[in-house]
Image (tube, grey):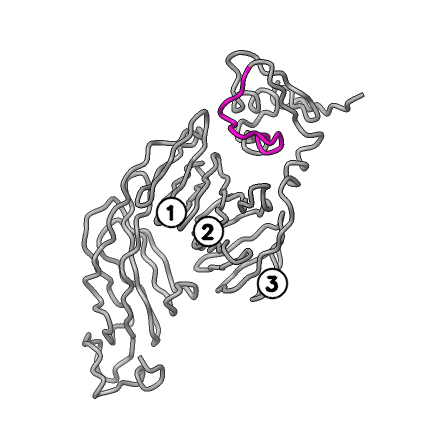
C-alpha cells in the first residue's frame, strides 16, 4: 500500500506520495497549489515527473508527488563545482568559503554586502554571484544543464553556451550564453540576456528571449513579453586613466533611465568589489582610499531589468599634500606614487 503523508495547513490538505489524475482544466500550477499548498513547486514536480513540456498536460495524465518534500532536492545527479575567485563574506553551507573549495549539488552558497564569488562547473558552467545573494545548487539534469535555485539576489551566468543553465525562482529561466538573473524578496524575477538566448517558463506561459533583450516575471509567476535592453551609459567622469586627489570622488555618466547599477572595484574582473549602488540620478560619490580602481555602470529600466554594462574606466585616487584635491590625467613622463607602485 502506498504511504500518503497529509498535513492540514490553513484549511487545505497538503499531500506527498500521492498520484493525481489530470482532469480537464487542470494546470500544473493549480495542482501544486491545490495539493501542496504552494504553486511555485510546479517546476520541481515537473522535473520529478520528467515532463518534456510542463505547460501541456492532458486529461487522464498521471502526476506523481514524491513521498517527501526533501525528495525534490535529489533529482539532479551530483557534480562538483570549484570556487575560482571570491572576495568578502562568502559562505558555503554556513562555512567561510575559500579559493579551490568544492561546491556540490544541494549546497547553499551566500554572499554578503560587497562580496562576490565565481564558481566553475566543468569547463563551461561559470556562475558569478553578486552581493547579497543566496543560491542552492540543484545538480545537473539529464540533458546536462546545470540547475540552481536563486533564493534572493543576482546571479551572472557568464559562460554557458554548450551546457546551458536553468535558474529557478518563481519561474524557470533556461539560458545558453551570458545572462544576468535577479530575484527580489517581493517575488519579482528579471532576466537580461547579453549573449546567446533564453527561455522563461512561468505560470501557464513560456517566453523566448533573444540576445539583447530582457524580461520580468511578476510575483504571480507570470512572465512578461521581452523588451530591448537599455544601451550602456557613457561615463563622463572620471576619464579613463585619470588620477584624482579627491578622497570622495564623484562619478558621472550620461543617458536617461529609471535607475542605474554602479560598480567600483579594485580589479577588472569586478570581483574585489569596493561598492555597488542603484542611484536614480546620473551621478554618485563615494569615499575611497588611495588605490587603483575600475568603474562601470549599467542602465536599469522601469521594470528593474539591468542593461549591458558600459566600458569600464580605470582611475586612481592619490592624496596630495597641501592640496584638497585635484583631477588630472595620467602623465607617464611624471610618474606619481600610484604609478610607481602599481605600474598604472
Find numbered disc 2 in the image and state the secondary structure of the residue it sits on. loop
In the picture as drawn, the residue positioned furthest to the right comes out as 1
> Mark 2 against mark 3, which lies toward the viewer?
2
**How many labels, in total?**
3
In the image, residue 8 above or below residue 201: above
Magenta-span inclusion, residue 274: no
Separation (CA) of disc 1 from disc 3: 29 Å
Q: Tell me the quadrant of the picture where the N terminus can be found.
A: top right
Q: Tell me the quadrant of the picture where the C terminus can be found.
A: bottom left
Q: Which numbered dot is residue 196?
A: 1
Percent x, y of residue 273 = 41, 63
Indicate left or right for 57 with 49 as reference: left
Q: Which of marks 2 and 1 is nearer the N terminus?
A: 2
Q: Which of marks 2 and 3 is nearer the N terminus?
A: 3
Q: Which numbered dot is residue 160?
A: 2
* Disc 2 to disc 1: CB gap under 8 Å: yes
Q: Which of marks 1 and 3 is nearer the N terminus?
A: 3
Image quarter for residue 143?
top right
Q: Which numbered dot is residue 101?
A: 3
Percent x, y of residue 152 = 48, 45
Separation (CA) of disc 2 from disc 3: 21 Å
* Disc 2 to disc 3: CB gap under 8 Å: no
The crowding category of the residue bearing disc 2, from other C-alpha atoms within 10 Å (few below 14, some 14 to 19, many at least 20), is many
In the image, residue 244 above or below residue 97: below
In the image, the segment drawn in magenta is 45-58
Indicate left or right for 210 with 167 as reference: left
Main SS of residues in magenta: loop
Amino acid at each position: 500500500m502506498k504511504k500518503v503523508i497529509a498535513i492540514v495547513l490553513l484549511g487545505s490538505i497538503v499531500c506527498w506520495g500521492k498520484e493525481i489524475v489530470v482532469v480537464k482544466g487542470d494546470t500544473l500550477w493549480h495542482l501544486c497549489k491545490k495539493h501542496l499548498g504552494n504553486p511555485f513547486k510546479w517546476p520541481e514536480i515537473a522535473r520529478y515527473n520528467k515532463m518534456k513540456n510542463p505547460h501541456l498536460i492532458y486529461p487522464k495524465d498521471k502526476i506523481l508527488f514524491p513521498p517527501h518534500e526533501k525528495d525534490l532536492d535529489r533529482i539532479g545527479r551530483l557534480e562538483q563545482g570549484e570556487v575560482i575567485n571570491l572576495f568578502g563574506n562568502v559562505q558555503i553551507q554556513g562555512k567561510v568559503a575559500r579559493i579551490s573549495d568544492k561546491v556540490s549539488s544541494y549546497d547553499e552558497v551566500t554572499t554578503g554586502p560587497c562580496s562576490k564569488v565565481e564558481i566553475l562547473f566543468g569547463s563551461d558552467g561559470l556562475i558569478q554571484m553578486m552581493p547579497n545573494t543566496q543560491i542552492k545548487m540543484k545538480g545537473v539534469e539529464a540533458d546536462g544543464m546545470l540547475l540552481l535555485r536563486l533564493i534572493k539576489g543576482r546571479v551572472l551566468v557568464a559562460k554557458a553556451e554548450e551546457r546551458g543553465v536553468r535558474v529557478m525562482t518563481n519561474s524557470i529561466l533556461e539560458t545558453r550564453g551570458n545572462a544576468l538573473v535577479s530575484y527580489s524578496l517581493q517575488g519579482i524575477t528579471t532576466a537580461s540576456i547579453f549573449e546567446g538566448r533564453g527561455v522563461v517558463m512561468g505560470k501557464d506561459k513560456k517566453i523566448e528571449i533573444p540576445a539583447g533583450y530582457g524580461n520580468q516575471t511578476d510575483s504571480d509567476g507570470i512572465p512578461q513579453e521581452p523588451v530591448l535592453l537599455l544601451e550602456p551609459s557613457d561615463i563622463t567622469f572620471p576619464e579613463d586613466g585619470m588620477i584624482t586627489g579627491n578622497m570622495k570622488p564623484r562619478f558621472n555618466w550620461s543617458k536617461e533611465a529609471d535607475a542605474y547599477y554602479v560598480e567600483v572595484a579594485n580589479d577588472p574582473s569586478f570581483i574585489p568589489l569596493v561598492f555597488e549602488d542603484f542611484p536614480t540620478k546620473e551621478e554618485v560619490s563615494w569615499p575611497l582610499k588611495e588605490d587603483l580602481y575600475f568603474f562601470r555602470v549599467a542602465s536599469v529600466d522601469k521594470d528593474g531589468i539591468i542593461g549591458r554594462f558600459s566600458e569600464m574606466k580605470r582611475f586612481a585616487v592619490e592624496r596630495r599634500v597641501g592640496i584638497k584635491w585635484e583631477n588630472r590625467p595620467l602623465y607617464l613622463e611624471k610618474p606619481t606614487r600610484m604609478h610607481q607602485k602599481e605600474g598604472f
